[in-house]
Image: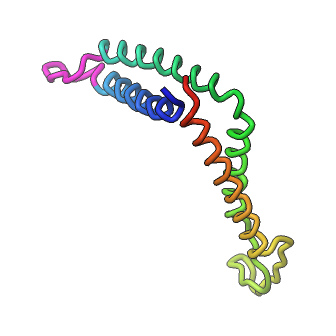
Amino acid sequence: MNITKALKQKNKLVSKTNEYISHVSAYNSIQEGTTRPYDAREALEKAMASVDELVALKTAIHKANAKVYDKIFKLAELKSLVSKLKGLDCKEGMHQSYRMDSPVKYTAQISIVAKDQWIEKLESQIEMLQEELEAHNAKTKI
């Protein structure tokens, strides 16, 4: 199995584990005389088996990704940076503040245009890294 398929399988296992735990929580303690659609003990055992499978799969994925960790970490940090830059206040000129009686003049070191250019540049790097990682995930077997 390649990493791409392994990542999809990992997501399915996470979802299944959460479903089992949900059954444990919902049906462990019920009103007496009520029908119990799921056995809480059985659901917990399935959750534990799913966790064991998940740990093994995650370990295999991490070992296979060892040579591209730098790209994975760079991708995550660039995405975080873009997210923060998108929220950067770049207002300039006179603006009325609800806390002030008169307008206040603002100045920004990084203009909205410069901010947008930075974001575009970073998003281009993100796209390149994603393509490299997708190629790695498709060809690398675990």
Closest to the observer, 130 or 28: 130
Q: What residue is rendered at 58% in x and 20% in y?
A: 59
Q: Left of 61 or right of it: where is 124?
A: right
Q: What residue is rendered at 41% in x and 14% in y?
A: 49
Q: Magenta span has 34?
A: yes
Give the x, y percent position of residue 135: 59, 41
Closest to the observer, 137 or 22: 137
Question: Toward which corner of the image does residue 37 lie, by quadrant?
Answer: top left
Q: What residue is rendered at 67% in x and 47% in y?
A: 129
Question: Toward which corner of the image does residue 88 lie, by quadrant?
Answer: bottom right
User: Above or below — where is 120 with respect to 19?
Assistant: below
Chain part drawn in magenta:
27-40
Q: Magenta span has 6?
A: no
Q: Left of 102 or right of it: where is 127?
A: left
Q: Left of 77 or right of it: where is 130?
A: left
Q: What residue is rendered at 62% in x and 47% in y?
A: 130
